[in-house]
Amino acid sequence: MKRTAILLIIMTLLLPMALFGKKELTQEEKMAWWQDARFGMFVHWGPYCLYGGVYNGHNQRRGGAEWIMNRCKIPVREYRATASRFNPEDFNADSLVAMAKDAGMKYIVFTTKHHDGFAMFKSDASNFNIVDYTDYGRDIVDDLVKACRRQGMKIGFYYSQSQDWCNPGGAAGKKAMWEGWENRDSVEINNYTKEHNGSWDYLQTTKSFDRYFHDVALPQIKELLSRYGDELGVIFFDTPMSITKEQATEVMDILKDYPQVIVNDRLRRPDFPGDYKTPEGRIPKKEDVDGIYWETCMNIGSSWGYKSWENAWKPGKTILRNLLTIASMGGNYLLNVGPDPQGNVPSEARECLKDVGEWLGKNGEAVYGTRRSNIVEDWGVCTLKDEGRGCVAYLCVFDVPESGRIQVDVGMPVKKATLLKDGSKVEFSNKGGVTDIRLPKDMSADPIATVVKLDLKGKLPPEKLISNSEKVFRIVDAD
């Protein structure tokens, strides 16, 4: 009798979930962890890394090295033959996740399939995947998800839903031959590309886009969600071309079963605004991101995919000041790395991430869980955060004025001012809504930012953000 009663209670609890599906989330609940995170790692990796931005002895002239197949007009069979040799024996998913964690990153967004059509996971929809098409034979996506699970890291998936240059019928960005290399047949190839909506190989045109979408893209999205949807944090679509409103609706209908998954604004424009906006390669103006969720994705070098001749690495100082500026305007920073053919992140990128992690280890409270202040001044930026019964402001001073003084209006009176690094007191005065900060004369300036913590009177007002803004940011490398 007792056992029957317990079973009835369990069934009563489970019945609403079975009838009505998973719990609905408010937009604020859905976005909460993502907003608190502020800093994530983007990983562009696939067989394009085997070229390293070089084709037939020519350095790719324009764009990221992950576009080499398109810009250099590599024939499908040739590219697939090269991809079959992809064998990243040095890759270790736990090491990659640990690198991101040590750098102070809170989530990873991984390219499960880029525009070349090669899936970094086992797929029944196309054998052009790392398990079935290479001797390596391991499911990179599965390895990475498990490593994130072990280390408590949020995982997100990038998936190219429209472009696919190796599976027939996929869309292709219209790039001219000069963007890749100086081929003597470029005029003929360019003419063919114009006549075939971006395709340069007849093998790409043997199916319609609708067939491609329903044979490959939609099934692969279903595969990824059925395997990992319950723990997936983000799905990042890209270059929305050819996809129809009806097709995009099919994708969103599947995602209804995973209400916690945050979706970006690149599935289809303008009908599907997603949960957040994606400025690329730059920090937008304050007015362009007012009142919305947003994330800047940016390279640690000059290319998303591995480029063997990369020489434009960003130093840790640039990365950190970017992060602080983005956080001060309420955004997230998704910083990209591109592993090499063996599966290693280039040493220059690793050194940069090490420097970033060391600084955030001491000053991260000025970034994580903060809210926008929209205070961006010549001397630096400011972030805000509720703390206990009050709230705090973090003045991130990039360049100390010669006067040693800073004036700022944080919206409420200041009760206390200290240096974040050691808690030492900083002199200040409140007058007419403006706080005058007098930095210590003997203060050794931090080359990244000297952070002054201000304890404020009161709590921050509620912040209501929207996800359906009509604002659209340009996808740089798709042009």
Image (tube, helix red, strand yellow):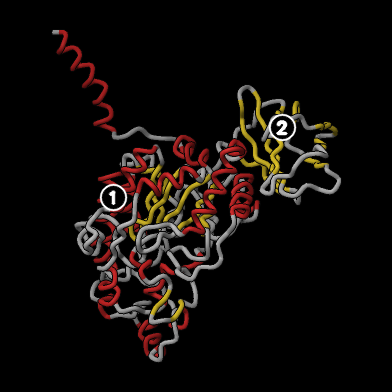
The tag on residue 224 is 1
Q: In this view, does 100 lie to the left or right of 210?
A: right
At which x and y percent is residue 228? 29, 44
At which x and y percent is residue 9? 23, 16
Q: What element carries label 1?
A: helix
Q: Is mark 2 on a helix, strand or loop?
A: strand
Residue drawn at the location 38% of the way across and 75% of the way down? 70
Question: Do callouts 2 and 1 mark residues in contact (Cβ within 8 Å)?
Answer: no
The residue type indicated by label 2 comes to Leu
Query: What number of labels is visible?
Result: 2
N-terminal-most mark, 2 or 1: 1
Of tags 2 and 1, which is closer to the observer?
A: 2
Alpha carbons under labels 2 and 1: distance apart: 45 Å
Residue drawn at the location 71% of the way across and 37% of the way down? 452
The residue type indicated by label 1 comes to Leu
Which residue in the protein does label 2 denote? 454
Check the picture and name the quadrant holding the N terminus: top left
Q: Which of 84 and 231 is in front in this view?
A: 84
